[in-house]
């Protein structure tokens, strides 16, 4: 009897696992790169579905040429190149991550059976993304000819509304252009700089240094610094941008003016172990909750780190590297009262006739900071717009909070710094977060802020 019960238990467990596999794991296994042969068989039986924007525009579809051969068409060409991806020389972007779903048909079962008897393909499901074509086009146009990236997110849901990377490619001609793209290795056209590009954060990192200061002092009151344009510690000197002399400053003023001297001294005065804990709590050196390829951000600071390197680290230089996507996530947590929502690109899956198959709901990922800490950082970032380096965003019909960055890299004597801006709009009830980097473009206030302004303006335009 015991043996019989054991066999029944094993049988029920097996049935349970098969159900779990088909409901939860089937798509993951089917979409694995190790399962390419199986995906190939899907193509023989299913017409790959469409990728569609949140506002109903087709971003990728399957068409036929004059000889009846199927090919993927990308109506927006370069605009969505990295985020939607390509299908031809392999696959990338959403074409890769949602490949099995696009090659699965949940159409009417009678129709599917009829197609099988007629030896005709079924039509695959459509992927409805979170991407907004107006914002994507605005970000694409605003970045212009600069290399770099833009990310636009909803902080309270995690929806990614736009993701732009340049230089780019035309997914419609990827096969023809493949050799030329790979010969031009220095431009890394296939790399999605939004998530895979790592850059020194420059003064945008002062957001994080400010959080570390708050956690160690529990106040910004009482801080005072007299900026004469430079500060020296350990035989190393940090200069303010353009050697500006800011004079007497409290903490909000030093932040709004992006005073390198003040923040370099702040970095030296902080407990370095606790400083490192704060940075680690914001997901540096860790895996990020992203469903698409990315690179982990890097940060290094030890108790034994020299004053010289600590000063550089505090102003976003030194050995720190971060992606525009990661900075967007940190600012999203600030805008969302300290809570980071998991970023996502797919809103739902539908049959080709519009019947819902699966809906992806917003998910809270982690509390990165307390609501009080988020409020204090919001206040600092609001000051940057109201009277600091992002003043160009003031008086535009919406409120905004943010931080600029001008990040040195490589040989500073022969390279132009990267231009950064990170921030959000409608401060009291934030609508969107924007993260911008323009490579070798100059000051964040002069280049990245106007780029962000065009995106905010587009969001609030009729």
Image: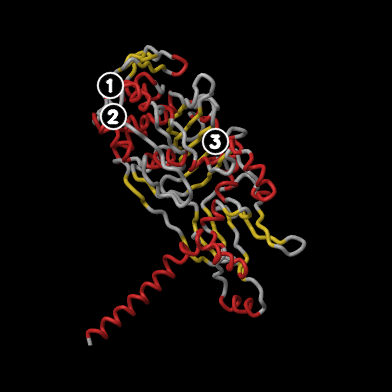
Around disc 1, counting alpha carbons within 10 Å, would you say few (fewer than 14), some (14 to 19), or many (20 or more)? few
Q: Position of residue 290 (x, y in %)?
A: 43, 49
User: Residue 370, position in %: x, y?
Assistant: 29, 41
Residue 415, percent across and down? 53, 23
Q: Secondary structure at mark 2?
A: helix
Element on which disc 3 rests: strand
For label 2, count other residues whose C-alpha is less than 10 Å away and answer few (under 14), some (14-19) or many (20+): many
> Which residue in the structure is indicated by mark 3?
148
Where 26 falls versus 81 (above or below)? below
Circles 1 and 3: CB atoms closer than 8 Å:
no
The residue identified by callout 2 is 213
Which image quarter is the C terminus in?
top right
Which residue position is annotated with label 1? 223
Q: Residue at x 51, y 28 (%)?
A: 418
Q: Give the left or right position of residue 350, taking residue 73 as reference.
A: left
- Sequence-first disc among 1 and 3: 3
Name the element at disc 1.
Answer: loop
Give the alpha-carbon distance from disc 2 to disc 3, as whole Å: 30 Å
The CA distance from mark 1 to mark 3 is 36 Å
The part of the image, by quadrant, that contains residue 427 is: top left
Camera-side mark, 1 or 2 = 2
Q: Residue at x 59, y 45 (%)?
A: 134
Name which residue lies at 37% across and 31% down: 207
Whether the residues at callouts 1 and 2 have beta carbons within 8 Å, the answer is yes
Closest to the observer: 299 or 204? Answer: 299
* Residue 140, horizontal then vertical, whole percent: 59, 40
Residue 67, picture quadrant = bottom right
């Amino acid at each position: 009897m015991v043996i019989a019960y054991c066999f029944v238990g094993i049988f029920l467990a097996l049935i349970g696992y098969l159900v779990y596999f088909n409901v939860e794991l089937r798509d993951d296994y089917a979409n694995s790169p190790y399962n390419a042969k199986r995906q190939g068989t899907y193509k023989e039986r299913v017409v790959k579905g469409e990728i569609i924007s949140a506002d109903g525009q087709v971003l990728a579809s399957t068409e036929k040429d004059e000889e009846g051969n199927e090919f993927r068409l990308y109506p927006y060409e370069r605009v969505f190149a990295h985020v939607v991806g390509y299908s031809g020389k392999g696959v990338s972007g959403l074409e890769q991550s949602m490949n099995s779903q696009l090659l699965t048909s949940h159409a009417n079962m009678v129709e599917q059976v009829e197609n099988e008897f007629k030896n005709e393909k079924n039509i695959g499901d459509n992927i409805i993304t979170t991407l907004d074509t107006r914002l994507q086009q605005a970000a694409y146009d605003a970045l212009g000819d600069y290399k770099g990236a833009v990310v636009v997110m909803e902080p309270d849901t995690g929806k990614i509304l736009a993701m732009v990377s340049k230089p780019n490619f035309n997914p419609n001609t990827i096969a023809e252009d493949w050799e030329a793209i790979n010969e031009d290795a220095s431009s890394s056209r296939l790399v999605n700089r939004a998530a895979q590009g790592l850059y020194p954060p420059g003064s945008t990192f002062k957001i994080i240094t400010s959080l570390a200061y708050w956690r160690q002092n529990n106040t910004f009151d009482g801080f005072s610094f007299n900026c004469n344009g430079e500060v020296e510690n350990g035989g190393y000197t940090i200069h303010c941008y353009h050697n500006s002399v800011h004079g007497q400053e409290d903490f909000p003023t030093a932040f709004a003016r992006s005073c390198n001297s003040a923040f370099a001294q702040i970095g030296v005065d902080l407990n370095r172990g606790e400083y490192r804990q704060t940075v680690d709590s914001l997901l540096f050196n860790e895996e990020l909750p992203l469903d698409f390829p990315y690179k982990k951000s890097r940060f290094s600071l030890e108790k034994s780190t020299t004053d010289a390197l600590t000063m550089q680290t505090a102003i976003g230089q030194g050995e720190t590297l971060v992606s525009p996507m990661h900075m967007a996530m940190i600012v999203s947590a600030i805008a969302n009262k300290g809570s980071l929502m998991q970023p996502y690109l797919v809103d739902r899956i539908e049959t080709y006739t519009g019947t819902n198959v699966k809906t992806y709901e917003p998910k809270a990922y982690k509390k990165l900071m307390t609501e009080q800490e988020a409020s204090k950082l919001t206040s600092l970032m609001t000051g940057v717009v109201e009277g600091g380096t992002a003043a160009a965003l003031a008086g535009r019909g919406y409120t905004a909070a943010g931080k600029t960055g001008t990040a040195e890299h490589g040989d500073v004597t022969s390279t132009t710094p990267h231009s950064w801006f990170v921030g959000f709009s409608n401060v009291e009830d934030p609508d969107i977060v924007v993260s911008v980097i323009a490579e070798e473009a100059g000051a964040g206030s002069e280049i990245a802020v106007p780029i962000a302004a065009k995106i905010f303006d587009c969001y609030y335009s009729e």
